[in-house]
Image (cartoon, grey):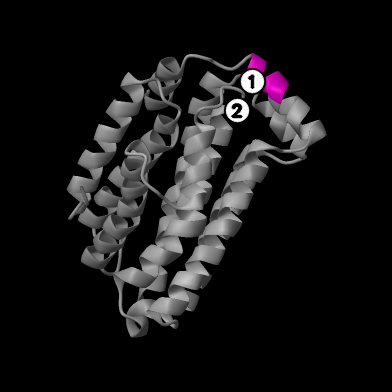
Amino acid sequence: MLAKNIDEVIHRLEQIVDDTTSRKDPLGIFALVYLGVTKSVKEDVQRNVFQDGPRMERLDVVFANRFILAYDAYRASQPCTQAWLTAFNAAKRFDLLVLQHLLMGMNAHINLDLGIAAAATVEPAELPRLEADFNKINELLVAKIDEMQDRLCKVSPLLFLLDWCGKRTDERFAEFSLVQARSSAWRAANRLSKLSPEDQALDINELDGYVALLNKVITSPGVVFGAVVRFVKWFEVKDVGRVLALLRD
């Protein structure tokens, strides 16, 4: 069932978190983080942080419904986008880090869904006026990074080894990746807004394949980095219910 406003989005995400928690399903990892971000967006709309609060709520709803529809379709064994299919199928694997599950959800939702949602929220001529508020979301998401880092370290105490291996801090990497992903989404929104429905479908299909490929890279990081991932995984909390509880605290 599609959400009609941000309160319904929050309700549906809470249902998904409860559903995945009851089944100890790793799909709840992204859903739980997304729920927190959505609540923050609602607060910012209420505090008049955005130039156009109602428009931002519309974007939030269109954006969230793409995840909700994909989740419902997958649970009903119905087709969904390649990007979400790779993320959902990966939840059946128990050799992946909590961070990998989270990154796959973020990749599918930001690199694929966000640009599509932005283009669908407003008329093409109005899209430039959306950009300032669109970019304000970057600030909100980046502000969440430190908080999430602390929670992830409760679940995965050796996560710092990935910093060492990657020669960068988690915070810098997360902020850079997030901002770059949203910049790509904005370019996709501008591109899609200029296309006919038929050409939009072709463009989205191509983008979907690219994002699905990125998810496969997240699950197969290479020989050296993969060895570090396996070592970090050995010391990570294994029980998904406990993982979700720690991320929620």
Q: Quick one: quadrant of the C terminus? A: top left
Mark 1–mark 2 CB contact (< 8 Å): yes
50 or 197, which lies in front? 197
> Can you name the residue that lies furthest to the right here?
224
Residue drawn at the location 51% of the way across and 41% of the way down: 87
Q: Secondary structure at mark 2?
A: loop
Disc 2 residue type (three-letter)? Leu
Q: Residues within 10 Å of mark 2 (few under 14, many from 20)?
A: some
Q: Residue at x 35, y 54 (%)?
A: 66
Rendered view: 212 above or below 238: below
Query: Can you tell which of label 1 and label 2 is closer to the viewer?
Result: 2
User: Residue 133, can we see it?
Assistant: no
Q: Is residue 22 left or right of residue 224?
A: left
**Residue 186 position within the rendered picture, expressed as x and y whole percent measured from the top left:** 48, 68
Determine crowd level at label 1: few under 14, some 14-19, many 20+ residues with C-alpha closer than 10 A.
Answer: many
Q: Is residue 174 magenta?
A: no
Asked whether, in this view, residue 49 is left or right of residue 207, the answer is left
* Tally of marks: 2
Q: CA distance from mark 1 to mark 2?
A: 7 Å
Q: Which residue is mark 1?
A: 233
Amino acid at pointer 1: Lys
Q: Looking at this view, is 122 or 207 the one in front? A: 207
* Pick the front one: 193 or 136: 193
The dominant secondary structure in magenta is helix
Give the residue drawn at x 30%, y 53%.
Answer: 65
Residue 8's tag is none
In the depicted structure, whether residue 15 falls above or below residue 194: above
- Residue at the disc numbered 2: 96
Q: Which residues are magenta?
A: 230-234
Q: Residue at x 58, y 35 (%)?
A: 100
- List x then y, in percent, for residue 53: 24, 63
